Image (tube, rainbow, N blue to C red):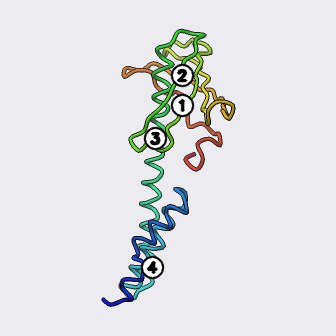
Amino acid sequence: MGIAAVKTPSSAAILVTALLLAGCSSTPQIAAAVTGGAVGAATANPAVGFAVAVAVDAGANYAVRYYGRSRQGAEQDAIAQIAGALPIGTEAAWKIEHTIPIGNEHGQLRIVRTIDSPLADCREVAFSVDEGKGKDLKRAWFTTDICKQTEGWKWAAAEPAVERWGFLQ
């Protein structure tokens, strides 16, 4: 192996560094470029490398979005469960603690009103997402509807078209 093998960073180290620097939104493209380049070089066929890169990009993009949606769903369920247990006009704190403790959110929620419907028991909820503490606290407010289903209270609104959800829209 020699000295060159010891001093040359491994492909895995380069990939991990690139992923950490790029953030989640570029992860699929970086993974696709690295994998496609490696396969193209190994097979000496750029068409095979390109095909693998496209497949890796599609798969990684799906995985990143699925993971983001599952975290978003957990956050929505946490808000709905707390809001469903409260009387109209009251306020409570909410929070979510994910398995991977990045992006744990918290804030306040208020039950605004009951929505009369013969189909389901529904409520309008105003909730905040808080960032920072004390005098540095920034609170952004959003509204949504929740409805009671057989498994409990659930988020009833379609995907919110707000900047908060980023590329997951």
Q: Position of residue 53 (x, y in %)?
A: 45, 72
Q: What residue did someone put label 1 on? A: 106
Q: What residue did someone put label 3 on? A: 71
Mark 1 neighbour density, 10 Å: few (under 14) some (14–19) many (20 or more)? many
Instruction: From the image, state whether disc 1 or disc 3 is nearer to you.
Output: 1
Task: Identify which amino acid the numbered label 2 is placed on.
Answer: Ala
Secondary structure state at the residue bearing disc 1:
strand
- Return the disc, 3 or 4, that comes first in the chain's sequence: 4
Q: Residue 37 shows which numbered tag? A: 4
Secondary structure state at the residue bearing disc 3:
helix
Comparing 141 with 93, the one in front is 93
- Disc 1 versus disc 4: distance between alpha carbons? 42 Å
Comparing 46 with 71, the one in front is 71
- Disc 1 versus disc 3: distance between alpha carbons? 13 Å
Residue at the left extreme, as displayed: 1
- Return the disc, 2 or 3, that comes first in the chain's sequence: 3
Mark 3 neighbour density, 10 Å: few (under 14) some (14–19) many (20 or more)? some
- Return the disc, 1 or 4, that comes first in the chain's sequence: 4
- Disc 2 versus disc 4: distance between alpha carbons? 49 Å
Instruction: From the image, state whether disc 1 or disc 4 is nearer to you.
Output: 1
Locate the C terminus and report the quarter of the image it occupies. Answer: top right
Pointer 2 with pointer 1, Cβ within 8 A: yes
Quadrant position of residue 7: bottom left
Pointer 3 with pointer 4, Cβ within 8 A: no
Task: Identify which amino acid the numbered label 3 is placed on.
Answer: Arg
Q: Residue 93 shows which numbered tag? A: 2
Q: Position of residue 106 (x, y in %)?
A: 54, 31
Locate the N terminus and report the quarter of the image it occupies. Answer: bottom left
- Return the disc, 2 or 4, that comes first in the chain's sequence: 4
Secondary structure state at the residue bearing disc 4:
helix
